[in-house]
Image: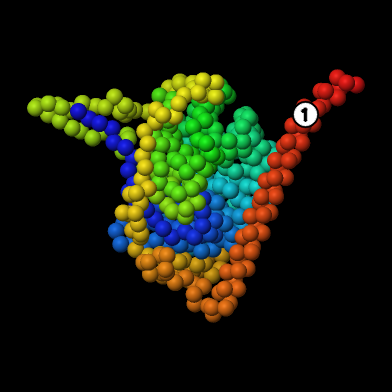
Amino acid sequence: MSTLEDPSLERHFRGHRDVVTAVDFNPNMTQLASSSLDNNLMVWNFKAKMRAYRFVGHKDAVYCVQFSPSGHLVASTSRDKTVRLWIPSVKGESTVFRAHTGTVRSVDFSSDGQAMVTASDDKTVKLWTVHRQKFMFSLTQHSNWVRTAKFSPDGRLVVSGSDDKTVLLWDLNSRQCLHTFHETGGFVNCVDFHPSGTCIASGSTDGGLKIWDIRMNKILQNYTAHTGSVNKLSFHASGNYLLTGSDDATLKIFDLLEGRIFYTLHGHQGPITAASFSRDGNYFASGGNDEQVLVWKTNFDQIREENTSSNNTKTKHRRDRPVGPHPTVEDIPPRQDRISPRPVADSNTVDARQEIRRLDDVTHGITNVIPQTSSEGDLGKNTIVSEPSTLRSSQSLESQLPQQLTTFMQHVAGQLDILTQTVSLLEQRLTMTENKLSEYIADRGPKVKENS
């Protein structure tokens, strides 16, 4: 008989020095890019004995990284309010885009690679041309930080999610908001289009996951599987599955056609802050607070053949999906588990934490690529600094400075990090207070009128 294989851990990359914020596969499957709060992005090479590249250029935390559809460019966004385009090679030339006035949280390429969309704490979504490297226009209707924005597969629409608890659907021709989907729970952390373009998914800070139909403007499925914030989500190329990463230290894969949790995966120590399927769906990657990047082989969309009798008859597993076009809205059954909860026990659990030790430090060193100059429209010249293969004990640029100066700089950097985190926390508390005050005023308004 044939049986379904579970996802398996394939690679384990170390090199980041802080929380990993995003991961993305090169479409040609030769590289994986990751971004981090350590101000850098890494490009990991899958070919044997090839070093990884650390691109140093952003002046603050990097929140998002994505390959262009051709794989020839990598885009990154940062707390330094810039967007950078990099060539993912040892030369590492980069171009800087400046138009946002706040932290830039996300970047996404259109399917033809001609445009980018970015989302920022300045409450705007902005569109850019890639090859001409020009700002086009802003979409301004959110009333709070915009965490994420994504193109539709045909490039005509954009969906964005915000701390104002809304998911907005935009038409790029008219530059107007077509519809507002309201999140009743937490803030919206992540959104993405289904490969068919007929529905969208959103994940929020209350652990909720929703599938919205953009034709009928209604909710199709509503999951509460995570006990922590849903930080990232990604559709499988088939459209049948959805991957999520959460503060509860688990990755989950949802079977959308059966309307249930398919797999729960353990591998990271602490919150998972990055998760993405490869373009072909054969792999997925994850990153977290533990500074690690893990690469998994999907497997569950394949069949392992086994002999069923003496004549070696082969049969398909009942869960195997037929090959064909992406499922549409009509194929995804409604599911509202806030109304009728379904136990999480019907998912398969994969624990890869022991496997990580076997795969530890598979990278053959890291090469730092440091732009000396960089501005809008200009490619920066770079200084290349190589690190030995023992990553944790490798010498960095700081070790070439006098020890006292290095210690002082590290102390200042630590204090700045603490100050930045404090300001960020105060901003979040202020936002929560404003929301509670608005709710209080909205509740008290009718009562005051009744009393008067």
Residue 54 % position (x, y) = 45, 62
Q: How many marks?
A: 1
Name, please, the residue furthest toward the bottom: 402
105 vs 155, nearest the viewer: 105
Name, please, the residue furthest toward the left: 310
386, above or below 354, in the image: below
84, above or below 298, in the image: below
Residue 409 % position (x, y) = 59, 71
At 62% across and 32% down in the image, what residue appears? Answer: 185
At 40% across and 65% down in the image, what residue appears? Answer: 391
137 vs 317, nearest the viewer: 317
Asked if residue 444 lies left or right of residue 223, the reply is right
Residue 311 % position (x, y) = 9, 27
Question: Element type at marker 1?
Answer: helix
The answer to whether any part of residue 127 appears in the image is: no
At 35% across and 51% down in the image, what residue appears? Answer: 356
Please name the residue that numbered disc 1 is placed on: 442
At 51% across and 29% down in the image, what residue appears? Answer: 223
Asked if residue 188 lies left or right of residue 36, the reply is right
Q: Could you tell me which quadrant the N terminus lies in?
A: top left
- What color scheme is it? rainbow
